[in-house]
Amino acid sequence: MHTNRIFNFNPGPAALPLSVLEEIQSSFLDFAGTGMSITEISHRSKWFDEIVNDAIDRTRRLLKLSNDYHVLFLQGGASLQFGMIPMNFLPDGRSADYINTGTWSAKAIKEVEILKKSVRVIASSEDKNFSYIPEDIQVSPGSVYVHLTSNNTIKGTQWSEFPETSGVPLIADMSSDFMSRPFDPKAFGVIYAGAQKNIGPAGVCMVILRDDLLKRVPDDLPSMLKYTTFASTNSMYNTPPQRKLSTPAIPLFS
Amino acid sequence: MHTNRIFNFNPGPAALPLSVLEEIQSSFLDFAGTGMSITEISHRSKWFDEIVNDAIDRTRRLLKLSNDYHVLFLQGGASLQFGMIPMNFLPDGRSADYINTGTWSAKAIKEVEILKKSVRVIASSEDKNFSYIPEDIQVSPGSVYVHLTSNNTIKGTQWSEFPETSGVPLIADMSSDFMSRPFDPKAFGVIYAGAQKNIGPAGVCMVILRDDLLKRVPDDLPSMLKYTTFASTNSMYNTPPQRKLSTPAIPLFS
């Protein structure tokens, strides 16, 4: 029956392991003996707390995250992060550094420009059609963060060693290679990744955020656009995308 | 096997019909003969286009929507709409009218205040613990829209007739009673509803928006926070919450 499984290498969601899909399927009408589908249980229930906390614990263990990092689940994908990062961490009158290694970096840069905030592109491989990763990265004086895209699927480039930023928070969109290789999370202030490529189905975006950065979040952002809202509620300020945090996401890497 | 099904009346997601859950379950490993789960197919595929367009067509038919309304699917729930509505439709220097009939109205009002925009609460039932729906609503001169919550689950009140706003766009959070009764959509500029109560699982929010309002959307909002982005891409600017738009959402009402 499953000998003809097709793997999608087109844009959007990627394949999930068959065992993961089968586990979702078999428990779909009765999650953990609740008599309810996971799509039906309350996000204020102990069952759902366990799902979220298990996903967080596995993430912490796999990435060897220290306690000063939050593991958050947001909606809107990396595309919403492109806006939220500058809204939360780039005050007017300050500037952030971006490294442009392709389509997704360029989209992240564009969102800062849309917000009329100050962005410096401190390195780019656009001169050779994004065919390489820039070296000798120099952080600008006064930069509030440095943003990069860890892997560029369209051009086939990937950072092997991440730049040293002398204490300026490094922020990475890891959507397309998150959890596909070991890396040192301590180098980063924020890591974000839309789940659909590597860790689960579309509709949830994992954000790993160092605690001290929460102090930078301004008050005048809508609640759903502040990282503090998610950090203070274990990502359950409102009803989360409930099917997306289920165990299937994580056995991939354990 | 399914005689012990439990219905969740707690906060968050509500029950889905068993036939809907069974359809999801049976097609979960092989959606429409694709050899892929719906969680795996590309959102740029004809299969997914059909899912989205079918959900839109059913919505149009059930609500008797005219062609000047867009049917959009966003993430972030009604809580993100509380912020997006004023970000998109309430320019600085103007004012919007809100009607306060309970917890969710108050949350919507609070998000306008967070944005430091001007909100007028033109009617409220707070004086009697939100036990009634205010009557004789008077729209403020110059108001750019009027916002209300169509149903208040916590206090058990519901609008039976919606107020006449003399051409000022009426915006309604219908999360808890959307598609549970007939109503005239022509009275509204925007209707939004988190799916998880009435039309499907958590993780998608339906937004029905009258076309002329798109002209009011400012340029300087992040792409994922502009309604124009979703209207111009049939809600597929980025990877959508793919399991949430599947047929299960709609057979409830057809």
Image: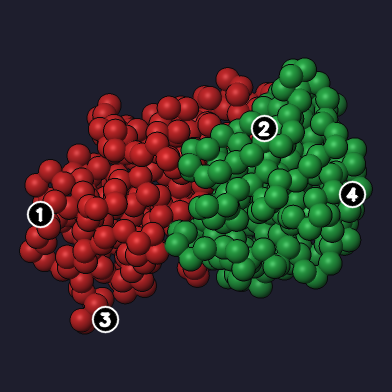
Chain colours: A red, B green
Specify whether B143 is left or right of B1.
left
For the point 60% across and 41% down, the residue is B119
Q: Residues within 10 Å of mark 1 (few under 14, many from 20)?
A: few
For the point 29% across and 52% down, the residue is A92
Label 3, label 4: how far apart the Cα atoms are = 54 Å
Q: Are marks 2 and 3 in contact (CB under 8 Å)?
A: no
Label 4, label 2: how far apart the Cα atoms are = 21 Å
Which is closer to the viewer, label 1 or label 3? 1
User: Which disc number belongs to residue B183?
Assistant: 4
* Label 2 sits on residue: B104
**Residue B83 place in picture, x, y as percent:** 55, 45
* Label 3 sits on residue: A129
Which is closer to the viewer, label 2 or label 3? 2
Give the residue type at disc 4.
Phe
Which residue is situated farthest in the front direction here?
B141
* Label 1 sits on residue: A141
Which residue is situated farthest in the bottom direction here?
A128
Q: The residue marked by circle 3 belongs to what chain?
A: A
Give the residue type at disc 1.
Pro
Where disc 4 sits, the SS reads loop
